Every structure is written in C-alpha cells, then in structure tokens.
Image (cartoon, rainbow, N blue to C red):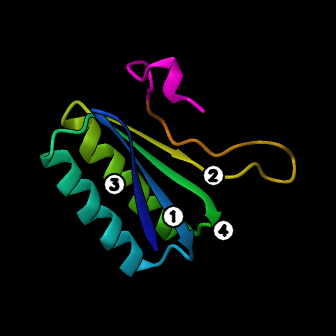
Amino acid sequence: MIRTEQLASDTIMFHMRGQFNPRVAKELSLSVFRSYHLGFKTFLCNLSLGTTLDEDAIYQLRLIGEGLRDKGRNWRVISPPSSNGNQLILRTSLQHLAHEHLN
C-alpha cells in the first residue's frame, strides 16, 4: 500500500506499507510519474512501515531514482534504522528542501 503526502509545494513523500513486490513497485513508479508531471521536484520514499527489501526491490527503487535524477529531480529513500543503527538512504540530495519540512 502506498500513501502520499505533500510536504511542500514541490515536495512529495510516498509512504510504503507492507511488502515491496513487483505490483507495489509498478504502483510507486506510476505515482512518481504522475507527481513528476504535476510539477514536483523532490521525491521522498519512506519505507519505515515496510518489510525488508530484496535485491529486486532495491533495483526498482534505483531505477526510479535514476529516472528522476536524469530529469533534474531529487529522490531519497528512507528506511527504518537497522539493528546496528544504520539507515539505508539511496543516493540523492535534499539541498533544496527547507529545514522546516525535515521532521
């Protein structure tokens, strides 16, 4: 399941819940595509409510991110801290996101 939240006029966050399977990957891709055409520039994907990612899921998230970066957009994937306290964040930038939107 994917829930979207607009954080600023040009920033949107996708909250993922449950297993990240091919159907959910396609749904996320379509949601990102629609949001891109609506003018969003920064895309965040919150996986904190999701399950463990496999290599296919990580590959799909990278494809989405690469497509957005090729178009000059920002993409960030955030997952819950692991048992050692590290956080998975796929390469991107939030330089243009105002501090008040970083809760």
Query: Which badge, 4 or 3, is on the more N-terminal residue?
Result: 4
Badge 4, how many Cα within 10 Å: few under 14, some, many 20+? few
Q: Position of residue 25 (x, y in %)?
A: 38, 70
Badge 1, how many Cα within 10 Å: few under 14, some, many 20+? many
Of the residues shown, which amino acid type is indicated by label 2?
Ser
Q: Position of residue 10 (x, y in %)?
A: 28, 33
What residue is at 49 percent from the left and 58 percent from the top?
15
- Res 60 → quadrant: bottom left
Residue that mark 2 sits on: 79
Q: Position of residue 92 (x, y in %)?
A: 44, 33
What residue is at 28 percent from the left and 36 percent from the top?
69
Q: Label 1 to label 4, Cα distance in Å?
A: 12 Å
What residue is at 83 percent from the left and 43 percent from the top?
85
Residue nearer the viewer, 84 or 33: 33
Residue that mark 1 sits on: 16
What is the magenta segment's predominant secondary structure? Answer: loop
Query: Which badge, 2 or 4, is on the more N-terminal residue?
Result: 4
Q: Label 4 to label 3, Cα distance in Å?
A: 18 Å
Q: Compared to 80, does 95 lie above or below? A: above
Query: Which badge, 1 or 2, is on the more N-terminal residue?
Result: 1
Q: Position of residue 20 (x, y in %)?
A: 51, 73
Residue numbers of the magenta segment: 93-103
Q: Nearer the viewer, mark 1 or mark 4?
A: 1
Residue that mark 4 sits on: 52
Of the residues shown, which amino acid type is indicated by label 3?
Leu
Q: Label 2 to label 4, Cα distance in Å?
A: 9 Å
Query: Which badge, 2 or 3, is on the more N-terminal residue?
Result: 3
Query: Which disc number belongs to residue 58?
Result: none
Residue that mark 3 sits on: 63
Q: Compared to 62, does 49 lie above or below? A: below
- Res 40 → quadrant: top left
Query: Which badge, 3 or 1, is on the more N-terminal residue?
Result: 1
